[in-house]
Amino acid sequence: MIDATTELYGVIGNPVRHSLSPIFHNRALRRMGRNALYLAFEVVDLEKALSGVRGLGIRGLSVTIPFKAEVIRLLDEVEEVSKKMKAVNTIVNRGGKLIGYNTDGWGAVAALEKVLSLEGKKAMILGAGGAARAIAYALKERGVEIIIGNRSIDRGRGLAEELNCGFKPLSSIEEVDGDLLVNATSVGMEPHGTETPLPRVPFKRGMTVMDIVYRPLQTRLLHDARRSGCRVIDGLQMLAYQGAKQLELWTGKRPEVAQIRRDLLWALRRLSR
Ligand code: NDP
């Protein structure tokens, strides 16, 4: 029941009307027995929005496009690795102090570790945007050897230099010879669901391929990888794990990830109707 003690959480972004977060977070909070509500806030002025969070005692926020980088300078504290990622996707309000975290990289690592050990592995990450940065830093922290592939050479090389790792322009990739490949570009996302970032590149049989695009759930990249005998991980796994980590940061309790994934599948089907 919503009453005078209900805790308020939400997502800030713009646009945010398409967000799956209110659906799965509200369901998870209910299952966790919290008297809590999670809403979507389409924000125009970020500074005013954060004053509102402080003033109203909103307990926690997810942060999405376009505020993940801009929000950093407005917070009281930011976790070290999120500073390196230059992106915050989660805010925890601890007694009026707003603390920033990034659960995207954590979510990607958790989705991968569910099916393989990352120790001593070699990964190619496609992309050099916000999600790719978070994933690259999180994998590097796990000791994974990384190579970045990106369309824009300056951006890709810049990230590779920060990480002290290799770089290849996307168009010159002829083979993927590591243990895992992560697509962190937006290529293949609806309405361009027939596209893939690597249209002519053979996959090594037995390697793991994760696509973080989740609309459509079965991207062309995953389809091609499966046909080549690779193990595939779809984008909902990362989304479910990163959301579960947000809930843990806010409540101190760990929710059931498999159930969050089921809720996300339900929400996706509902949206595509
Ligand atoms: P950004 O805009 O920060 O980065 C986009 C990346 O995609 C860049 O590397 C860009 O390359 C590349 N790219 C875009 N269009 C093309 C193209 N036509 N050909 C080649 N490369 C292209 O986005 P994000 O990093 O925030 O998000 C990337 C994707 O990840 C989105 O689809 C998003 O929905 C998804 N995502 C999924 C999450 C999950 O939990 N599953 C979490 C976060 C994001 P360039 O540098 O050359 O522009």
Image: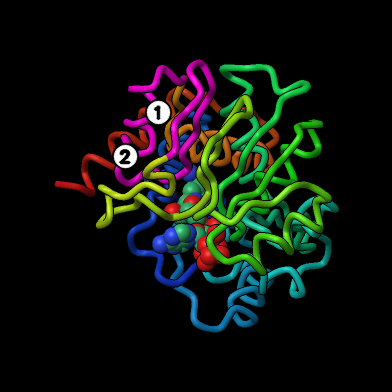
Report the front residue among 225 and 190.
225
On screen, residue 12 above or below 94:
below
Q: Please check the rendered image and state whether residue 229 is part of the magenta-colored stretch, yes or no.
A: yes
**Residue 58 % position (x, y):** 61, 61
> Majority secondary structure of the magenta segment?
loop
**Disc 2: which residue:** 220
Where disc 1 sits, the SS reads helix
Q: Position of residue 186 (x, y in %)?
A: 44, 55
- Region rendered in magenta: 201-230
**Amino acid under label 1?**
Ala
Q: Residue furthest left?
A: 273
The crowd level at tag 2 (other Cα within 10 Å; few <14, some 14-19, many 20+) is many
Where residue 86 sits in the image (x, y, percent)?
73, 63
Q: Image quadrant of residue 76?
A: bottom right
Residue placed under numbered mark 1 in the picture: 225
C-alpha separation, residue under disc 1 versus residue under disc 2: 8 Å
